Image (cartoon, coloured by chain):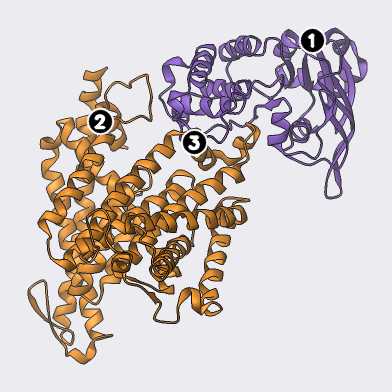
Amino acid sequence: MANTVLENATAAPVAPEEPHVLRSGETLPWIVVLVALVALPLVFTGGSQISTLNYLGVMAIFALSYNLLLGQTGLLSLGHATFFGLGGFAATHAVLGFAEAGVNFPLPLIPLIGGVVAFVLGIFGGWLASGRGGMPFAMITLGLSELVYSASNLFPSLYGSEEGVSMDRMDLGSSFGMDYGANSHIYVIVADCLVISAVVLKYFTTTPLGLLTNAVRDNAERVEFLGFSARRVRMWAFAVAAGFAGVAGSLAALNVEIMTVNELGAATSTLVLLMTYIGGTRTFFGPVLGAVVIGLMRIWLSDITPAWMMYFGLLFIFVVMAVPGGLAEMLQGGRRLITSGLLRAQLRPLAGVALAGAVGFAGTVILVELGYRAGLDASLGPAIRILGLPLDTTRPLSWGLGLVLVAGGGWALRQQLDALATRRHALAQPHREAVQ
Amino acid sequence: MTNAIEIEDLRKSFGPVEIIRGVNLELRRGERHALIGPNGAGKSTLFHLISGRLPATSGKIRLNGHEIQGKSPAEIAHAGLSRSFQITNIFPEMTVLENLRCAVLWKLGHRYSVLRPIRRLRDVNAECERLLVELGLQDRRAERADTLTYPEQRALELGLAVASGAGTLLLDEPMAGMSHTETAAALDLIKRVTEGKTLLMVEHDMGVIFEVADRISVLVYGEIIATGTPEEIRANPAVQEAYLGTATEEAA
């Protein structure tokens, strides 16, 4: 409550024009993305590091496409990976086909093929799934994706056998002054595709059809009484989202030069859902943020701890419960706080929240790691170093430490959040009067 | 000249219960027609049947001479009928301007277009501008619809119905839940924005009805027991017995 008062009080006078055109708050993420795309390969120059960047870029496009369904049209697809995978297979077979035919097709245009194939299949899938939104839509997309996944057994020439279909991206020869042997060449394609995809998807939101997707999300029934078919709006949103998922899948195939049926399975569909939601569905670049954070967690955290999936789940639960607007909204809130000039006055309770949260988190880490060592990794012995502390799964003191930290941190967090709310309430009152 | 709406022996059953029991109704072009009746008489159901939200069990509905029963809400909208809802039915998370933009897209022929950004469509902008002024919402254009006051939301609800440019409008209790002063303002607004259109309106406020309606139909237990001018309806003994008597007692 105090939060909303604060936001209202600090909001600039509402501009009467154009609520949806680029505002200053929307130009900053574009600048950040562009700068990051140029700067990152200069900082991370190693081959495998570039490959990681490629992976993050691919996931960013994938999540952006998914948000056209989830955030914009209000559709929960449980099978978006279908089009990621089908686009990837289309791209892989295109490369193989052109190579065999000896056609020097420029490699950077291969994602276009994957995208168009996925778009066309998306029209068909969208037509099937879009009769209604909500639960029926979610179930049909789940069914379709299982269907496509299990069809891999029927068409081994298309999907490859268990090891998938591999190709050599250098087979198409050089174009645009690159031979595509180095990962950095693929990075150029990924980065360009990310920018183009973002621009096209952003443009889509400004068109009549883009506006209608929002209308269908808000109130599908009323859309019908205005003369539109909600099904058709959903179908087109589905097809466009599928098309860009296909672009992402194609890029994934180019990056690792292999495509397997796992890419179009339920795990990949879940991954993109989590990335998009954690990043934030109500902000255009939220999904990109989610893709980067989750992508890095998958890569780095899995090196550090076997329990990385657990942290992944905890992060998801945290976002759903504490910041439903996602990490992007959290950042925006922070930015508003800084520009409001009220940060100094709240610094103490904010620091208290951070400290209490850190203590509780440390306790959680200790318990999770001890649990994993005692269970799954028992063969490695009971002694384990967690956060620099020498702990032991057989000693009650180790478990006790974790429990105390979790309980103490949780209790302190409650107190500090109350203090912060009180503080904000106090700050909001005189400020509001001053504005009025 | 054909009537705007002609309804012939329209029936609707939910399971064994017949809610609309053989309704016959004619709406002359350009008239303001009020539909009154006690709670549960089937007024909203009749609206849902005409606008395609519910399928009729039997009977015929003609809009400007074309049969529309069994068609989808969208098809009926294309045929020139638009409606508002008793419970506010707008796009809550979109701005007022975006709400209106959605409502004018079809008649201006942009439909599912992706050819140009909507803010570049001059005809859409001009039409939305006109509507904003007409509805008195020009200062609220950039607000999310769910942050509007109740009368403003009702005005937007009416605006969505009017914006589609349909010649025939069904308004389901446009003044429900409003105070006296708000009702007066809303009535003014309705008269202004529905100028020259055919209007069928459900309303409970008798003062409003006798002021606005050219003709009145009385629906009781799924049947129309009388249709006529306000004077005729006031003088009709069957209506007095079935409806007006109890209604005035309730109001008093």
Quadrant the C terminus of chain B occupies: top right
> Which residue, given by chain and number where applicable, does mark 1 sit on?
B214
> Which residue, given by chain and number where applicable, does mark 3 sit on?
B114
Q: Which residue is drawn at 32% across and 51% down?
A: A193
Q: Is mark 3 on a helix, strand or loop?
A: loop
Q: Are marks 2 and 3 on the same chain?
A: no
Neighbourhood count class around disc 1 (C-alpha, 10 Å): few under 14, some 14–19, many 20 upward? some
Number of numbered discs: 3
> Which residue, given by chain and number where applicable, does mark 2 sit on?
A24
> How far is disc 1 from disc 2 in space, using C-alphas?
53 Å
Query: Does residue A141 sit above or below B179 in this rendering?
Result: below
> Which chain does orange denote in the image?
A
Quadrant the N terminus of chain B occupies: top right
Q: In this view, does A112 lie to the left or right of B34?
A: left
For mark 2, name the chain: A
> How far is disc 2 from disc 3 in space, using C-alphas?
25 Å
Colour assigned to chain B in the rendering is purple
Q: In this view, does A282 lie to the left or right of A153?
A: left
Marks 2 and 3 close (CB-CB < 8 Å): no
Neighbourhood count class around disc 2 (C-alpha, 10 Å): few under 14, some 14–19, many 20 upward? few
Q: Is mark 2 on a helix, strand or loop?
A: helix
Query: Does residue A233 sit above or below A261 in this rendering?
Result: above
Between disc 1 and disc 3, whose residue precedes? 3
- What's the residue type where badge 2 is placed? Ser
- What's the residue type where badge 3 is placed? Val
